[in-house]
């Protein structure tokens, strides 16, 4: 009985020691890391430190300073600062609960209670949606409680509270950062963030954050959509130098009484009105169809570029039309050159054929005309120097006469000049002259 009382007394003393230690809270997000730092008194630098749960028995110890790392737990003892820190990585909802920082010593160990609270790394149940346009600006108002009046305010992109402060775009300590400006009005307990020079890349989710000294930071979620400034429709059009082209510009019915104009420039902020009283640009407005058209006559290469159909001089957000006009100079020149080239080539072909025909005709007439002398017939060469000529001077056989007749029937297209000797004796005038 006495021994049982001793055991109960020891157990109760241990519980009293654990529960009687000063405690603090630590907050973390699922999937992230959290640091549990515990201070200890002077003189315990060389003692073993550890982190445990539940009753802190041997099986409840999560990690000790002699292990450095164990599973999801790691420990570091800063003896100079007299502080041991345990890092728990990849937090889970089941990690929420009570922990004890322990210092091993002879007899009763020293303990410090830690309450760990885990939340999902997302925000928030309510999301404020905002819209703006390319090149414009937008402001967000973020209210806070009076107890946080002097606390740090910040603004970040994304939906994860765990990294918002580290990735803050602007804070109350650094109120200007590029296109972002933060203004804190403590009297009405609200800070405002302004984003200028918006582009479509600025679309996305944002968080307003207020740092708290104890507990989770406070956040408000915002979703921003930056729309293309101008256009319900964007068109690509082309024209040819010297020709005319017509640009169609629809507009909102509520703009029917507004002044309409066509503006040229890469961006609507720096474009210029191209419609003047004396120019190549003429405009017609069809109010019944909510459409105005602009005709550009006598297109020039310099007319290429970006045009904006405008029916609101204030350039408010609306249904505008953007037209990209290209002016084709090369096509017209190529077609003209090609036509001229074809005509020249055709003329040269006809001339060559005519010349060839004329040359061939002259050669045939030369060979078939009656020679005045034997030297003329042979171009000044004595025909009797050629033995074949002497032989053919004899009366021709029937086969030879047929060959001569064949040449006469085939016409001028045959190469009569290929065998001059044979042609000479096929010529009747030559035979008659020779027989005489």
Image: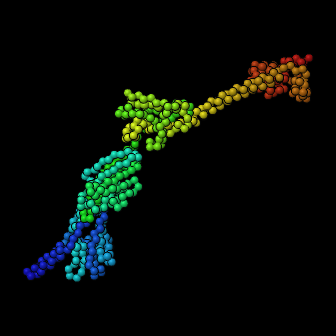
- The residue sitting at 10% across, 79% down in the picture is 5
Q: Is residue 195 left or right of residue 8?
A: right
Q: Position of residue 318 (x, y in %)?
A: 37, 39
Locate residue 416: give its quadrant.
top right
Position of 272 with respect to 75 (left or right) is: right
158 or 295, nearer to the observer: 295
Q: Residue at x 34, y 56 (%)?
A: 182
Image position of 268 (left or right of 423): left
Q: Quadrant of the N terminus?
A: bottom left
Q: Which residue: 36% across, 45% down?
A: 132
Identify the image quadrant of residue 364: top right
Image coordinates of residue 30 in percent, x first then y, are 28, 60
- Number of labels in the image equals 0
Q: Position of residue 53 (x, y in %)?
A: 22, 70
Residue farthest toward the left in the current orientation of the protein:
1
**Up/down of 99 relative to 280, above or below:** below
**For residue 142, above or below residue 416:** below
- On the question of residue 70 being in view, the answer is no
* Residue drawn at point x = 40 percent, y = 42 percent: 229
């Amino acid at each position: 009985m006495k021994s049982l009382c001793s055991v109960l007394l020891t157990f109760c003393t241990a519980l009293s020691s654990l529960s009687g230690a000063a405690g603090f809270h630590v907050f973390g997000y699922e999937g992230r890391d959290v640091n549990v730092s515990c201070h200890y008194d002077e003189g315990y630098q060389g003692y073993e430190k550890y982190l445990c749960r539940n009753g802190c028995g041997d099986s409840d110890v999560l990690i000790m300073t002699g292990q450095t790392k164990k599973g999801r737990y790691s420990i570091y003892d800063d003896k100079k600062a007299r502080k041991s820190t345990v890092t728990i990585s990849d937090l889970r909802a089941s990690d929420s609960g009570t922990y004890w920082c322990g210092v091993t010593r002879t007899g009763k160990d020293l303990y410090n209670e830690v309450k760990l609270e885990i939340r999902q790394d997302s925000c928030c149940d309510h999301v404020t949606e905002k819209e703006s346009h390319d090149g414009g600006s937008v402001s967000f108002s973020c209210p806070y409680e009076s107890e946080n009046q002097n606390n740090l305010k910040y603004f970040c992109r994304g939906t994860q509270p765990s990294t918002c402060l580290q990735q803050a775009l602007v804070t109350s300590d650094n109120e200007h950062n590029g296109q972002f400006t933060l203004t804190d009005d403590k009297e009405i307990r609200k800070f405002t963030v302004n984003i200028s020079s918006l582009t479509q890349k600025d679309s996305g989710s944002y968080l307003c954050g207020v740092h708290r000294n104890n507990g989770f930071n406070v956040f408000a979620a915002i979703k921003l959509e930056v729309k293309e400034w101008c256009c319900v429709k964007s068109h690509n059009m082309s024209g040819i130098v010297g020709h005319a082209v017509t640009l169609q510009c629809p507009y909102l019915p509520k703009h029917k009484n507004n002044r309409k104009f066509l503006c040229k420039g890469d961006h609507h902020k720096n474009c210029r009105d191209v419609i003047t009283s004396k120019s190549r640009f003429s405009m017609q407005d069809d109010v019944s169809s909510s459409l105005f058209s602009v005709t550009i006559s006598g297109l020039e290469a310099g007319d290429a570029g970006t045009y904006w159909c405008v029916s609101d001089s204030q350039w408010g957000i609306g249904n505008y039309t953007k037209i990209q006009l290209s002016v084709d100079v090369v096509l017209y020149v190529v077609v003209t050159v090609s036509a001229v080239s074809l005509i020249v080539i055709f003329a040269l072909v006809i001339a060559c054929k005519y010349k060839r025909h004329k040359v061939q005709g002259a050669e045939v007439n030369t060979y078939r005309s009656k020679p005045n002398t034997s030297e003329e017939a042979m171009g000044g060469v004595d025909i009797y120097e050629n033995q074949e000529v002497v032989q053919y001077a004899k009366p021709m056989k029937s086969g030879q006469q047929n060959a001569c007749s064949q040449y006469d029937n085939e016409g001028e297209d045959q190469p009569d000049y290929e065998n001059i000797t044979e042609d000479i004796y096929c010529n009747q005038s030559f035979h008659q002259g020779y027989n005489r």
